Image (cartoon, rainbow, N blue to C red):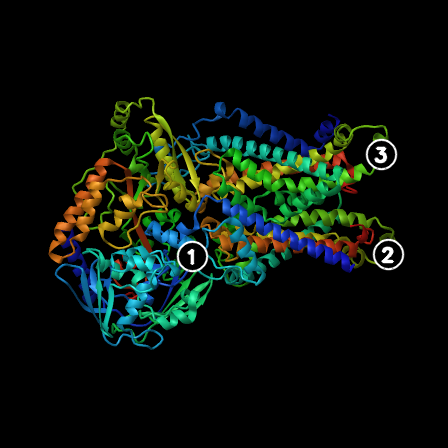
C-alpha cells in the first residue's frame, strides 16, 4: 500500500494508473456502455458500394468493413485484449516462477535440466513459435492466451532463477535449514516473499508484452476468432483499406500503444520503488 | 446451344476486330508485377496463379485455345483424327518445331512428356487428368514407366488410345500438365528443371533471381510466325498490389498481375482516367458454402434449402465492393452448360424459418463454419453468420490457415459448413465435367478429397460418366444439355449454397495494346502473353 | 578461456539440436497435410498418396526426423515442398535482404538510442530528459505493424518522400530500417542513459574536468567509450531477436527477406522451409547470446569466467 501511494505521487504514473483503471471499467461495463451491438452489421453502415463510413453521427468512430460500429467494437475489443493480456501474463508468470524457483532452489540435475529447457525455449524465434502453435490448435481466446504464455514465460524464469540462487546463498536460509525447516517451508515462507517485488514488476511489464503479442497474432490472422473483436483483429480486417479508411487502423492502434505504454510506465516505476538497487542510480 | 453459338460469335469478333482496329506492332519490353513468388516453371508441377500463364508461354502443347476465348484449336498438332468408336486419337505434328535448346520436337517427346506427368516420381498434381489413357494405372502405381496407350509411329505421328471415349480428352491435351518437354534437358537439370525450363513456346527464360524478378525473352524460332509481339517480359516479384498500381499509374509498370486490391477498387472504378486501364473479365470460378450432407442436421434436405434461402448474396457482393456476381448454381456463367433460365432458391428469410420449423428446428441449432484466414474470407463468413443468426442458426466461425481448412473439410466429422473462398473452385479447363468430379462426384467424397459436402449421388455420377463418353463432335449439343440438367438436379439436393462468381480485374498501362480479352484470358490466366503488344 | 568457449559452443550445438527436434515435432502435430497442399485441387486420392510416399511422409516420426538430421549434417536442408527448390537456395536468396535490413535496423537503433541516451544523461532530470525517456517508452510499447503502417502512410503515401515498399537501394531500405530503429532504440537509450550517469560520477571524470578539458572532449573521449560497454552484449542478443522477428516489418514493406519466407511457408505447411528458417533463427539467437556471453567477461573483469 505504501508502494501504491508512492506510485501515485509520481504524476506520469498516476495518469497511467487512471488510464488503466478507465480501460478496465470500460471493458467490464462494456455491454451497458456501447451505443450499438458490436457484432451487428448494419446495412446502413456501408456506402452503396460497400465502403466503410468515416467517423460521424451516429457512428462516433465510423464503421468497419462490415458496417459495424467501430466505437462499440473498440470497447468490446478492450475486453478481449485485456482479458487475454492478463490471462496470458498470469500463466506466464506462474510457469516462469515455478520453473525459476525450482531450478534455483533445488539445483542439481533437475535444476540444470529446467534451465536447459529454458535456454532451449529462448532459442526459438518467439513469433514463429506462436504462429506455429496457433496452427496446431484451433485458435480460441484460451488457446491464444496459452500460446502467448508459452512464448513469454522464459524471461521471468531466468530472472527468478538468478534471484533464487542469490537468495539461497544468503545466511538466513542456512540458518533456517539448521533450525530444521523443511525445504517447502523455506521456499514458501521465506524465499517467495523476497521474490514478490521482482514477480510483481515483471508481471506488470509482462502485460505490455502480452497485449502487443496478442495484437500481432490477431494482425497476422492467427489470433482471436471472428466475430469477437480484439484491437489486433480489427486492424487485421481493415489493413488493406488503411489508405482509404485510415481511422480503422489508427484508432485501435493508438489504443494498443496507450495501454501497452501505461503498463510499461507503471512497471518501470514499480521497479524503481520496490528495489532501487535493481536499476542503479536513477 | 445458344451459349456455344454466342461464344463462337464473340470469339470471331474478338479475333477479327483487332485486325482492322489496330495492327499489332512488334517489339518492346513489358513489366509485370506479382506479389507472390513463382514456385516453379516445370509444366508438370506448376499450378499457381503466377506460373500458369508463364508456363503456357514457355512450352507448347498438342492443343491450345483461341486467344481470349475458351475455344479449342490445334497447336503442336497440325491435324488429328478420332477413330469411329472414339477411343483412338491420331495426331500429326507440325514439322520443324524447335525446342529452345535447338533440337527439333518429335512425337517421342510427346510420349515422354505425358509419361513424365503421370509418373509418381515427378509428384505432378495433374497426374490424375490422364487417367483415361490406357496404361495409366500401371504407371501411376509405379509398375511401369511407359504408357502403353501412347504409340509413336514416326517423328511426326503418334496415336493415343483411351480406355473409353472421353469428351474432355482434347482439353486435357491443352492443359499445362500435357506440355511437351525435352528429355535431355529434364535429365540434365533433374529436380531443378523447374528453375531452368526448356520448352518450345513463344518465350524462353533468360534470367531468374529468386524472390526478385524473372525475365522472359522472345523465342526467335517460334513455330507460329509473327508471334510473340513483345521482345521481353520482366516479372517483378514481391510487389505489393497497392504499390504496383501506383507505379502503373506513374508508368513504371505495364501490367499489375494481381489486379486491383479491394481498397483501391472503388477509387479506381470512379476515376475517369483510371477506369480505362481496368479490364473486367469473368472467371470460371464459383464461391460456395458446402453443407456436410452426412452430418446432422445437414442430412435433412429442408435444412439445406433453408440455409440457401437465409443467406443474402447481394449483401456479400456489396461487402466485396461489387467484384462478383451472385450465383444460383454450381457452374459459372462463362462455362458451357450454364443454365440462364434457372432461378434457384430465392433469398427469403421467412421461408427459411418456415422450412426449419417444418424440419423440426424451430429453435434453430448450433453449428460451425470453416473459413480461410486471409482477408476478405473471414468478413464474408461473418456476413453469412449474421444472416443465419436471423433464422436461429447459431454459427461459430473457425478461421484457419488454408491447409487446416482443407484437412478438416474432407473429414467425416468435422467442418459441417465450409466457405470455399480462397481455396476452391476454379476450372482447370473450360468444360463442365471439371466442375463435377472432384467437388460433387462420389470419387471426391472421400477423406482427402475436395467434395467437402460428402455429397454422393450415384445416379448423377452415372449420368456424368455417360455425358463424358459423348466424345463425337455431333454429340456436343446433347452433351451440354445433359450437363446442364445434371447440375440443376444437383441443386435440387442443395448440398451447396452457391454464393457468387468472382470477376477478374487486370490493370494495364496506356501503352499496352491487344484486345481486352487477352488481359482477362479465361485459360491463359491471367494474361495471354503471346498476343499482347506494345503501342 | 578455451575450455569455456568449447563448453559454450558444445552447449549451443545441443540447443540447436533440441530446436530442430521440437520444430519437427510441432510440425508433425499440425493437422494439415503437405501432400494435399502439393497435390492441389484436381488430384485424385491416389495421386495424393503417391506424392506422400515420394516425400517420405508416410514414414514414422523418428524415421523422418533422423533422415532430416542426416541430411542436415551434410549441409542439405532438404527441398521445399511448394517451391521445389533446395531450401538452402531459398534462404540464401533472401538472406542478403534480411541481413541488410538487420544491419540498417541495428545501425539506426544504435544511432538513435545512443544519441538520445547521451542527451538524456547529460541533461538529467530536465524536461528534455523526461521527454526523451517517454519517447523511448512509446517506442517499445508500439506494435511493429502499427508503426510500420503509420510510417508507410505518412512518409510514402502522403508525403511521397520514399518509395512504397519493395526492395532496392538505400531509398527502399530507409523506411523499414528507420521503423525498426525507432522502435528498438528505447532499450538502448535507457541503458546508455543509466550507464552514462554512472560513469559521469566516477572519479576519473572529475579529474579530467578539473584538468581543464572541455566538456565535449570529456564526454566523447572519456565518458562515451566507457558508457557504451554494456550496450555491446545487447547487440548480440538483438541480432538473435531480429532474425526471428522481421516477419511483420517485411510483410508491411514488402521486403523480400527471411521473415516473409517464414510466414508464407507456415501458411502453406512447407515443412522443410519452416524447419530450415526456424533452425537458422535459432542459430542466430544462440550465436548472438554466445557472442554476448563471451564479450561480457572481456569488458567487465569483475565477472569470473571460471565460475560459470
Q: Nearer the viewer, mark 1 or mark 3?
A: 1
Same chain for mark 2 and mark 1? The answer is: yes
Query: Does residue B129 appear in the picture of this structure?
Result: yes
**Disc 3, SS:** helix
Judging by the rendered image, the residue that carries numbered circle 1 is C54
CB atoms of marks 2 and 1 within 8 Å: no
**Disc 1, SS:** helix
- Where is C18 relative to B220, above or below? above
Q: CA distance from mark 1 to mark 3?
A: 63 Å
Which chain hosts label 2?
C
How many numbered tags mark residues here? 3
Residue A174: assigned label:
3
Foreground residue, B150 or B295?
B150
Quarter of the view holding residue B96: bottom left
Question: Relative to A217, is B282 on the left or the right?
Answer: left
Which chain hosts label 1?
C
Q: Residues within 10 Å of mark 1 (few under 14, many from 20)?
A: some
Foreground residue, C147 or C233?
C233
Q: CA distance from mark 3 to mark 2?
A: 47 Å
Q: Residues within 10 Å of mark 2 (few under 14, many from 20)?
A: some
Question: Relative to B262, is C243 on the left or the right?
Answer: right
Q: Nearer the viewer, mark 3 or mark 2?
A: 3
Quarter of the view holding residue A59: top left
Residue C208: assigned label:
2
- Where is C152 relative to B204, above or below? above
Q: Quadrant of the C terminus of chain A?
A: top right
Q: Position of residue C223 (x, y in %)?
A: 79, 55
Q: Residues within 10 Å of mark 3 (few under 14, many from 20)?
A: some
Amino acid at each position: 500500500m505504501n508502494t501504491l501511494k508512492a506510485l501515485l505521487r509520481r504524476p506520469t504514473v498516476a495518469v497511467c494508473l487512471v488510464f488503466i483503471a478507465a480501460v478496465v471499467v470500460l471493458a467490464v461495463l462494456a455491454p451497458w456502455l456501447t451505443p450499438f451491438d458490436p457484432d451487428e452489421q448494419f446495412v446502413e453502415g456501408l456506402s452503396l458500394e460497400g465502403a466503410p463510413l468515416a467517423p460521424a453521427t451516429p457512428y462516433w468512430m465510423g464503421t468497419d468493413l462490415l458496417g459495424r460500429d467501430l466505437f462499440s467494437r473498440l470497447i468490446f475489443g478492450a475486453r478481449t485484449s485485456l482479458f487475454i493480456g492478463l490471462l496470458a501474463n498470469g500463466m506466464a508468470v506462474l510457469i516462469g516462477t515455478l520453473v525459476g524457483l525450482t531450478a534455483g532452489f533445488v539445483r542439481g540435475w533437475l535444476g540444470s535440466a529446467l534451465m536447459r529447457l529454458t535456454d532451449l525455449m529462448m532459442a526459438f524465434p518467439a513469433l514463429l513459435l506462436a504462429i506455429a502453435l496457433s496452427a496446431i490448435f484451433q485458435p480460441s481466446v484460451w488457446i491464444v492466451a496459452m500460446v502467448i504464455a508459452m512464448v513469454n514465460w522464459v524471461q521471468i524464469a531466468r530472472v527468478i532463477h538468478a534471484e533464487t540462487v542469490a537468495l539461497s546463498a544468503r545466511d538466513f536460509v542456512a540458518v533456517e535449514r539448521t533450525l530444521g525447516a523443511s525445504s517447502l517451508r523455506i521456499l514458501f515462507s521465506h524465499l517467495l516473499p523476497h521474490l514478490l517485488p521482482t514477480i510483481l514488476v515483471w508481471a506488470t511489464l509482462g502485460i505490455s508484452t502480452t497485449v502487443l503479442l496478442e495484437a500481432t497474432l490477431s494482425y497476422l490472422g492467427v489470433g482471436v476468432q471472428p466475430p469477437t473483436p480484439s484491437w489486433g483483429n480489427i486492424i487485421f480486417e481493415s489493413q488493406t483499406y488503411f489508405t482509404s479508411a485510415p481511422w480503422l487502423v489508427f484508432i485501435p492502434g493508438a489504443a494498443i500503444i496507450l495501454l501497452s505504454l501505461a503498463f510499461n510506465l507503471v512497471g518501470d516505476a514499480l521497479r524503481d520503488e520496490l528495489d532501487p538497487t535493481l536499476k542503479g542510480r536513477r | 446451344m445458344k451459349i456455344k453459338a454466342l461464344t463462337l460469335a464473340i470469339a470471331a469478333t474478338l479475333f477479327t476486330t483487332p485486325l482492322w482496329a489496330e495492327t499489332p506492332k512488334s517489339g518492346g519490353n513489358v513489366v509485370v508485377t506479382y506479389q507472390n513468388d513463382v514456385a516453379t516453371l516445370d509444366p508438370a508441377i506448376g499450378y499457381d496463379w503466377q506460373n500458369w500463364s508463364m508456363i503456357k508461354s514457355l512450352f507448347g502443347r498438342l492443343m491450345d485455345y483461341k486467344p481470349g476465348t475458351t475455344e479449342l484449336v490445334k497447336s503442336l498438332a497440325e491435324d488429328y483424327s478420332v477413330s469411329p468408336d472414339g477411343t483412338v486419337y491420331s495426331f500429326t505434328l507440325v514439322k520443324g518445331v524447335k525446342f529452345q535448346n535447338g533440337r527439333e520436337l518429335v512425337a517421342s517427346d510427346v510420349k515422354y512428356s505425358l509419361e513424365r506427368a503421370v509418373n509418381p516420381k515427378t509428384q505432378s498434381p495433374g497426374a490424375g487428368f490422364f487417367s483415361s489413357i490406357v496404361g495409366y494405372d500401371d504407371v501411376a502405381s509405379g509398375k511401369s514407366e511407359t504408357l502403353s496407350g501412347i504409340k509413336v509411329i514416326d517423328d511426326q505421328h503418334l496415336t493415343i488410345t483411351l480406355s473409353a471415349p472421353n469428351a474432355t480428352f482434347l482439353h486435357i491435351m491443352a492443359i499445362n500438365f500435357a506440355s511437351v518437354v525435352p528429355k535431355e534437358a529434364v535429365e540434365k537439370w533433374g529436380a531443378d528443371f523447374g528453375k531452368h525450363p526448356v520448352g518450345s513456346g513463344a518465350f524462353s527464360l533468360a534470367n531468374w533471381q529468386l524472390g526478385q524478378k524473372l525475365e522472359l525473352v522472345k523465342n526467335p524460332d517460334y513455330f507460329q510466325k509473327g508471334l510473340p509481339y513483345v521482345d521481353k517480359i520482366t516479372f517483378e516479384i514481391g510487389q505489393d498490389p497497392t504499390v504496383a498500381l501506383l507505379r502503373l499509374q506513374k508508368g513504371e509498370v505495364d501490367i499489375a498481375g494481381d489486379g486491383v486490391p479491394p481498397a483501391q477498387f472503388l477509387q479506381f472504378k470512379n476515376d475517369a482516367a483510371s477506369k480505362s486501364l481496368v479490364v473486367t473479365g469473368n472467371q470460371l470460378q464459383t464461391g460456395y458454402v458446402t453443407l456436410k450432407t452426412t452430418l446432422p442436421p445437414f442430412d435433412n434436405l429442408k435444412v439445406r434449402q433453408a440455409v440457401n434461402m437465409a443467406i443474402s448474396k447481394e449483401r456479400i457482393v456489396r461487402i466485396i465492393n461489387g467484384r462478383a456476381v451472385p450465383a444460383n448454381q454450381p457452374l459459372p456463367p462463362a462455362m458451357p452448360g450454364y443454365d440462364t433460365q434457372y432461378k434457384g432458391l430465392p433469398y427469403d428469410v421467412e421461408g427459411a424459418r418456415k422450412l426449419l420449423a417444418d424440419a423440426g428446428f424451430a429453435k434453430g441449432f448450433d453449428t460451425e463454419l470453416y473459413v480461410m484466414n486471409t482477408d476478405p474470407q473471414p468478413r464474408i463468413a461473418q456476413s453469412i453468420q449474421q444472416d443465419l443468426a436471423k433464422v436461429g442458426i447459431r454459427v461459430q466461425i473457425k478461421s484457419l490457415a488454408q491447409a487446416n481448412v482443407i484437412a478438416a473439410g474432407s473429414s467425416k466429422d468435422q467442418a459441417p459448413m465450409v466457405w470455399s473462398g480462397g481455396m476452391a473452385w476454379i476450372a482447370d479447363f473450360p468444360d463442365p465435367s471439371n466442375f463435377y468430379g472432384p467437388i460433387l462426384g462420389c470419387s471426391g467424397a472421400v477423406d482427402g478429397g475436395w467434395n467437402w459436402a460428402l455429397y454422393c449421388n450415384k445416379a448423377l455420377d452415372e449420368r456424368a460418366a455417360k455425358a463424358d463418353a459423348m466424345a463425337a463432335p455431333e454429340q456436343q449439343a446433347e452433351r451440354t444439355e445433359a450437363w446442364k440438367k445434371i447440375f440443376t438436379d444437383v441443386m435440387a439436393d442443395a448440398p451447396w449454397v452457391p454464393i457468387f462468381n468472382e470477376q477478374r480485374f487486370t490493370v494495364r498501362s496506356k501503352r499496352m495494346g491487344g484486345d481486352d480479352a487477352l488481359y482477362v484470358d479465361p485459360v491463359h490466366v491471367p494474361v495471354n502473353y503471346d498476343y499482347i503488344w506494345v503501342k | 578461456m578455451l575450455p569455456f568457449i568449447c563448453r559454450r559452443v558444445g552447449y549451443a550445438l545441443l540447443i540447436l539440436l533440441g530446436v530442430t527436434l521440437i520444430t519437427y515435432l510441432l510440425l508433425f502435430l499440425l493437422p494439415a497435410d503437405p501432400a494435399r497442399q502439393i497435390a492441389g485441387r484436381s488430384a485424385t486420392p491416389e495421386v495424393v498418396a503417391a506424392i506422400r510416399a515420394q516425400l517420405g511422409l508416410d514414414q514414422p516420426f523418428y524415421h523422418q526426423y533422423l533422415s532430416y538430421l542426416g541430411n542436415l549434417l551434410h549441409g542439405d536442408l532438404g527441398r521445399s515442398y511448394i517451391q521445389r527448390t533446395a531450401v538452402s537456395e531459398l534462404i540464401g536468396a533472401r538472406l542478403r535482404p534480411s541481413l541488410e535490413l538487420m544491419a540498417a535496423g541495428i545501425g539506426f537503433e544504435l544511432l538513435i538510442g545512443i544519441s538520445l541516451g547521451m542527451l538524456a544523461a547529460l541533461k538529467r532530470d530536465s524536461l528534455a530528459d523526461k521527454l526523451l525517456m517517454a519517447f523511448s517508452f512509446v517506442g517499445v510499447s508500439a506494435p511493429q505493424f502499427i508503426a510500420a503502417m503509420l510510417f508507410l502512410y505518412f512518409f510514402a503515401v502522403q508525403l511521397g518522400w520514399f518509395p512504397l515498399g519493395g526492395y532496392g537501394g538505400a531509398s527502399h531500405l530507409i523506411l523499414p530500417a528507420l521503423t525498426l530503429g525507432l522502435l528498438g532504440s528505447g532499450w538502448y537509450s535507457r541503458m546508455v542513459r543509466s550507464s552514462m550517469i554512472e560513469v559521469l560520477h566516477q572519479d576519473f571524470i572529475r579529474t579530467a574536468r578539473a584538468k581543464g578539458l572541455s566538456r565535449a572532449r570529456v564526454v566523447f573521449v572519456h565518458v562515451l567509450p566507457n558508457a557504451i560497454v554494456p550496450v555491446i552484449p545487447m547487440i548480440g542478443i538483438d541480432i538473435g531477436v531480429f532474425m526471428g522477428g522481421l516477419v511483420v516489418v517485411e510483410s508491411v514493406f514488402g521486403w523480400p527477406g527471411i521473415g516473409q519466407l517464414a510466414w508464407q511457408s507456415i501458411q502453406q505447411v512447407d515443412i522443410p522451409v519452416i524447419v530450415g528458417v526456424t533452425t537458422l533463427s535459432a542459430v542466430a539467437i544462440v550465436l548472438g547470446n554466445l557472442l554476448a556471453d563471451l564479450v561480457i567477461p572481456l569488458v567487465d573483469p569483475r565477472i569470473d569466467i571460471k565460475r560459470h
